[in-house]
Image (cartoon, helix red, strand yellow):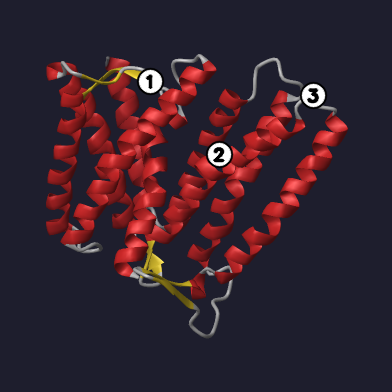
Amino acid sequence: MKQRIISAILFAVAMLTGVFGGAAAFYALFALITAGCLWELMGLLIPTEHDHRLWRRLAGVALGTAPFLIFGSKLFGVFPNLEASSEISYGLFRADLMENAIPILMAITLLPLAIFLLLILELFLKSARPFENIGHYLVGIAYVGVPFSLLINISYWHGDYAPLRVFGLLLLTWTNDTMAYFIGTFIGRTPFFTRISPKKTWEGTLGGIVCTFVVAYALSHWIDDFTRAEWMLLAMCVAVFGTLGDLVESMLKRSAHVKDSGAILPGHGGWLDRFDSFIFVLPFAWLALMIWEG
């Protein structure tokens, strides 16, 4: 327990330093987190006895991290903005692509090119299951790379990096996870999803959700980066999709027959174990904010 507490404190200090240390620290921190999550994901997806396993894991990390590295460059003004507005609108969804057009075009161009290069690589590696290997890389891009690249847009507000937006979303996710664990441990009686997570209970799940909304309400009085309605919307995204994200990662670990995705944090598991809920929340939080904020 002592080791678990020390690890949690060090983890929290590192996260807060990265989030509040400015755009460069945020970029470096989440580039590392993205790469760490991808390394563990590739380790779970690619069997131990697989030929060229190390090189395949490295390829998966490089490809999956690319979306974050490309979109994150907007924090430093690497790509020029379009001179004219390029707003798209579809029903409730509205977004101005002025700041994102060049990174989006790069991603659209580079992804098919990367897939063709991977096909050539598999041709020369003489793999028995080449398209299964390609699938591993694509899962890494979709499951880890794209969500963290969307965090860039969430964190970018009024033309600058806004750390409180990132901190608030992280705090809601940690509240949901932590309170669900503690409440479930002390008063949990009714199983929630025994097929995937035998220890998860309805009492813990609902307790975590209630605490998440309470924290969101408190944050609405402290951080005005989001309106109160937006804080409640984000709390709903965390309550629903954070819980599902934890279950999806449990399903992944069960399929790989492992208890933890890694051992980067003693007593807490690996990168994926710490960020499984947050990864799953990001696409839906981004979409909710795009619809609400326009």
> x and y percent of residue 28 in the render?
50, 48
Amino acid beneath label 1: Ile
Amino acid beneath label 3: Ala
Badge 3 vs badge 2, beta-carbon distance below 8 Å: no
* Callout 2 crowding tier (Cα within 10 Å): few <14, some 14–19, many ≥20: many
Q: Is residue 104 above or below residue 96?
A: above
Q: Is residue 190 above or below residue 154?
A: above
> x and y percent of residue 128 in the render?
79, 24
| Residue named by callout 2 | 35
Q: From the viewer's perspective, is the residue at label 2 or at label 1 nearer?
A: 1
**In the orientation shown, which residue stands out farthest toward the bottom?**
84
> x and y percent of residue 290 in the render?
36, 64
Q: Which is nearer the N-term, disc 3 or disc 2?
A: 2
Identify the secondary structure beneath mark 1: loop
Q: Is residue 164 above or below residue 126?
A: below
Residues at marks 1 and 3, CA–CA distance in whole angstroms: 31 Å
Q: Is residue 96 above or below residue 19?
A: below
Residue 263 in view, yes or no: no
Labelled disc at residue 126: none
Residue found 66% across the figure and 31% down from its top: 57
Residues at marks 3 and 2, CA–CA distance in whole angstroms: 27 Å
Q: Which is nearer the N-term, disc 1 or disc 3?
A: 3
Residue 18 in view, yes or no: yes
Amino acid beneath label 2: Ala
| Residue named by callout 3 | 128
Identify the secondary structure beneath mark 2: helix
> x and y percent of residue 240 in the render?
28, 41
| Residue named by callout 1 | 196
Badge 2 vs badge 1, beta-carbon distance below 8 Å: no
The quadrant the N terminus occupies is top left
Q: Which is nearer the N-term, disc 2 or disc 1?
A: 2
Q: From the viewer's perspective, is the residue at label 3 or at label 2 nearer?
A: 3
